[in-house]
């Protein structure tokens, strides 16, 4: 099963027979429910995840208790912060949470270090993923620094719709507030503003992105 998963979702890792066999030997596939915390801020990395199905989100916890969404982990990706934290042998500076029920290949941290030392192809995968997530982080910084809150909210909704393949989002104002490090009251007010501007349609338990 792991061999098929690597071939489908991580083809660059599967093209090298020796690397593929080593990954099969040290990994296992697990399923996780939405809401599962797979990495806590301040924790040491125990496993490196390779996402097969589902979706996870990576947050930065602020001193005031708020959390800011940094990036998503989609099928065919890993958590780049977990990889870099493992390489420097430090405590995690982010928190990762399963957003949708997910299927994940997990690699024990010590084995992942051995793979990194042994296979340049693995490091190429990490560098490419780092570049992708770096671009996402730059966009987050741009939105946080230069955008109004309603623009930031609309960008978030569009991203969610794209990732979940549907213009109708089944979510709550509180959940959005949690993702954006805001309050439910602020989010509710901004959602109503976006609806009045013709950007979205609000219904009980859903938001349609127009």
Image (spheres, rainbow, N blue to C red):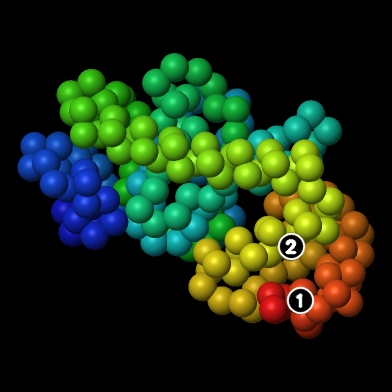
Horizontal side of residue 118 vs 79, given as left or right = left
List the residue tagged with mark 2: 154
- Vertical placement of residue 148 versus 161, above or below: above
Horizontal side of residue 186 vs 71, given as left or right = right
- Nearer to the camera, 193 or 99: 193
- Nearer to the camera, 151 or 77: 151
Secondary element at tag 1: strand
* Residue 104 in sight from this viewpoint: no
Q: Residue at x 8, y 37 (%)?
A: 18
* Residue 5 in sight from this viewpoint: yes
Horizontal side of residue 202 vs 72, given as left or right = right
> Rounded to the nearest whole Å, what is the CA distance between mark 2 and mark 1?
9 Å
List the residue tagged with mark 1: 200
Q: Position of residue 193 (x, y in %)?
A: 89, 69
Q: Position of residue 188 (x, y in %)?
A: 87, 65
Q: Residue at x 85, y 74 (%)?
A: 197
Secondary element at tag 2: helix
Mark 1 and mark 2 in contact (Cβ < 8 Å)? yes
The mark that comes first in sequence, 2 or 1, is 2
Splitting the image into 4 quarters, where does residue 47 fall? top left
- Mark 1, other Cα within 10 Å: few <14 / some 14–19 / many ≥20: many
- Vertical placement of residue 12 versus 93, above or below: below
Q: Position of residue 59 (x, y in %)?
A: 63, 41
């Amino acid at each position: 099963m792991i061999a098929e998963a690597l071939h489908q979702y991580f083809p660059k890792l599967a093209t090298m027979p020796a690397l593929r066999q080593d990954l099969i030997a040290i990994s296992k596939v697990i399923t996780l429910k939405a809401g599962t915390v797979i990495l806590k801020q301040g924790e040491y990395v125990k496993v490196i995840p390779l996402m097969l199905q589902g979706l996870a989100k990576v947050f930065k916890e602020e001193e005031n208790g708020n959390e800011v969404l940094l990036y998503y982990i989609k099928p065919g990706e890993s958590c780049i912060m977990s990889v870099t934290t493992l390489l420097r042998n430090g405590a995690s500076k982010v928190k990762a949470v399963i957003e949708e029920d997910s299927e994940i290949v997990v690699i024990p941290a010590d084995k992942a270090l051995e793979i990194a030392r042994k296979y340049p192809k693995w490091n190429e995968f990490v560098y490419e993923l780092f570049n992708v997530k770096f671009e996402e982080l730059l966009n987050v910084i741009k939105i946080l620094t230069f955008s109004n809150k309603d623009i930031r909210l609309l960008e978030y909704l569009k991203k969610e719709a794209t990732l979940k393949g549907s213009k109708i989002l089944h979510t709550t104002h509180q959940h959005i507030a949690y993702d954006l490090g805001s309050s439910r009251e602020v989010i509710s007010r901004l959602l109503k503003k976006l609806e009045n501007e013709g950007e979205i349609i609000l219904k009980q338990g859903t938001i349609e992105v127009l």
